[in-house]
Image (tube, rainbow, N blue to C red):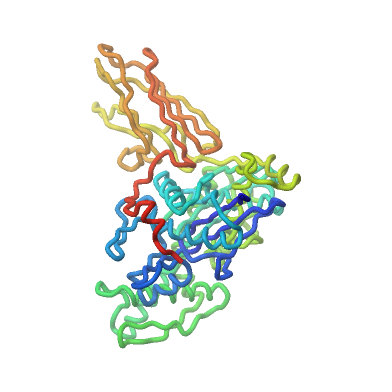
Amino acid sequence: MKKHAIGIDLGTTYSALATLNSSGKPEIVPNLDGERVTASAVYFQEDGPILVGQLAADAASGDSDKVIQHVKRCMGDHNWQIDQDGKNYSAVDISAMILKKVKKDAESTLGQIEHAVITVPAYFDEYRRKATMDAAEKAGLKVLRIINEPTAAALTYAKTGQCKGKILIYDLGGGTFDVSIVDIQSPQEITVIVSEGDHDLGGVNFDEALAEHLSKLFHKEKGTYLKTEEDSTPFRRAQTEAERAKRKLSKIEQVSPIPLNLGEHWMNASVKRTEFEELISDLITKTEMLIEDALFEANLKENDIEHVLLVGGSTRIPAIKKMLYKKFGKEPLSQVNPDEAVALGAAIQAGMLMHDQGMIELTEDAATALRNTRLQDVTNHSFGTISLNDHHGATAPRNSTIIPKNTTIPKSTTESFYTINDGQTQVHCQITQGEDEDPKFVNIIADGLLDLPPNRPAGLEIKVTYSYDANGRMSCEFIDVESGNRKKFDLDTASRAMKSSDKNDIDEAAFDDLEIE
């Protein structure tokens, strides 16, 4: 059976799947409707199969309680679940349905698909990454690796040979924003310098801002708001109309009519591009502030950036292009379709991994190009441990960073800590992810106990070594220096070493029985 190198961009509003052909070129695989992207929407019909894709998205304006959209924003949230027909579905379940749909559609063209590289926002933490991994596996995919979306886009552009030097990638998708600075020395030499982002900032926020504006216009004319506690459908319809208007305003100066209704009340609204730009100006400013953070972290100035690349459908908004041109003094580039760049890069990464393992055959030139590619990424968050520190005469827990955020990988670091009590027989070893010193504001991604010999004084050394390799695998070892006792953790941050915290109420057997179209 022929194996395929598959890359999937699991997006907030749209998802895309790409494959690598035998010549080493990535190609988007259209879905059964001939579309190059699939709407990330799920519709639980009263009678009939579960619908995934554009038909599901279209149903949101008429049957909003049965349509689930933007679930990517809920990944890793164990409190999020939706009840449909007496069954509870987690964000993992809904995302798995989307992945199952894009996989099934692609299989109608390619044949059976087993392996894939899946992309996530650079700023996703481990819980969200593991939830994505769980969703892919539930959809019947063996995940080769989880990679960052801007990194995948950089790989796409590097392979075109059109960009060289220090590149800023402005990645604004439907629900998330990432900015990465990447050094592309050649099509085979790509180094990520820094990544920043916000996993709750994206095109959906722009839609909501416009929908709220439309609701105010409706209230001004009709005396009532579209958003009510009793019925969310009118406002969901306004959000759908807002998204359509947003897309049109990237091409024309004014959109009219925009139909709005609540019961017997109807009106046609109109919106100018200048009005829309005013509504979203604060959101664009947020992305600009994250650009500043990335430049500061990388110790670079605007004039050090040779190219600005646009990734994600929301980058088509003219106000964003204006902001970037004003900031960097050059037109941002979008030679590769912003909706497709991430999936294409993921397919290239899949090809690199599968060829290394002898799983696919390529032409000699393509094989050589992939074999010689060096892609170096950075840690997306800081990793540390919980220690007790003296604070005004009292001990208080503190998150002690061992590998800082945006550290180039591979990396290995050793720090020394010390026991605090006479006769201490155990050390609580906790591995954290996050930047805050307060343990309440970081994730504990693994923990365990290191046993110590009895009857010893306080102040004995515990060496802690964190090693993070280029494949996203991290090992953490806590060693009692005097006795040699040790506690070791192996965390595959690009695979499935840690289960996500999502509630997952639909088991795999039941999920396989679901009728999804």
In this view of the protein, which residue sits in the foreground, 218 or 87?
87
From the viewer's perspective, is residue 62 above or below residue 450?
below
Residue 167, how many percent across, how many down? 62, 50
Among the 4 quarters of the image, the one containing residue 47: bottom left
From the viewer's perspective, is residue 435 above or below residue 309?
above
Q: Is residue 326 visible?
A: no
In this view of the protein, which residue sits in the foreground, 244 or 91?
91
Residue 402, how many percent across, how many down? 43, 31
Q: Residue furthest front?
A: 1
Among the 4 quarters of the image, the one containing residue 269: bottom left
Q: Is residue 405 left or right of residue 506?
A: right
Q: Is residue 416 left or right of residue 251?
A: left
Q: Is residue 39 visible?
A: yes
Q: What residue lies at 43% left-to-right and 24% top-to-bottom?
A: 415
In this view of the protein, which residue sits in the foreground, 418 or 221?
418
Q: What residue lies at 69% left-to-right and 49% top-to-bottom?
A: 164
Q: Is residue 44 left or right of residue 517?
A: left
Residue 367, how many percent across, how many down? 71, 44
Q: Is residue 446 left or right of residue 123?
A: left
From the viewer's perspective, is residue 480 above or below residue 359?
above
Q: How many marks?
A: 0
Q: What residue lies at 68% left-to-right and 46% top-to-bottom?
A: 361
Among the 4 quarters of the image, the one containing residue 428: top left
Residue 460, how many percent across, how many down? 34, 16
From the viewer's perspective, is residue 150 above or below residue 206?
above
